[in-house]
Image (cartoon, helix red, strand yellow):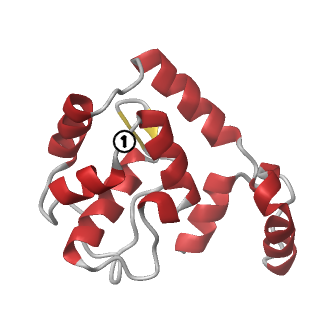
Amino acid sequence: MIQNLITQKPRSPKERYEGIISLPRFFDKLRAHAAQTLGEYKVGPDSALDKDLIDFLHIDFDKLAAFVTPDTPDEDVYTFIKEQFTVPSPDECVAWSDKIERVRLIDDPGRQAYAKMVIEKMNLPEDITTLDWLIVGDQ
């Protein structure tokens, strides 16, 4: 169970839990937030991917963050989410996750200038997905 993002990297943004992409990474960041070992990572509304996930799952971030401790296992976090919030159907979760997996870094209209700068500076392919870019950043 990852709890310290100062010394460890969170799980891949492509990893899924119950068909939901990036949920294991979100869990790692929540535990690190609870332990005050988030390091340079952002969690919740401060992270664009987390914000998309929170919006999709209809999560009250403050309520969830208050529940999670450094030792809360993934299963307990997900059970809390299902019991407290309105989680879409499994099919909707897979469809949303498949869509998120294909989003290119440059596709976000609000971040296009930043994305172009990052792609150029890091010498990345123009069609890099946001998730692949996050993986590069974790290395």
Q: Which residue is drawn at the image coordinates 35% and 76% (left, top)?
A: 38
Q: Is residue 15 left or right of residue 67?
A: right
13 versus 56 height, above or below: below
Instruction: Name which residue type carries label 1.
Output: Ile
Q: Is residue 118 left or right of residue 93?
A: right
Q: Which residue is drawn at the image coordinates 31% and 54% (left, top)?
A: 27
> Residue 104: percent from the left, percent from the top?
76, 49
The residue beneath circle 1 is 59
Q: Is residue 13 visible?
A: no
15 versus 38 height, above or below: above
Q: Secondary structure at mark 1?
A: loop
Q: Which residue is drawn at the image coordinates 48% and 53% (left, top)?
A: 50
> Residue 127: percent from the left, percent from the top?
83, 52
Task: Name the quarter where the N terminus is drawn.
Answer: bottom left
Q: Quarter-wise, where is residue 32 in the image?
A: bottom left
Which residue is nearer to you in this view: 121 or 70? 70
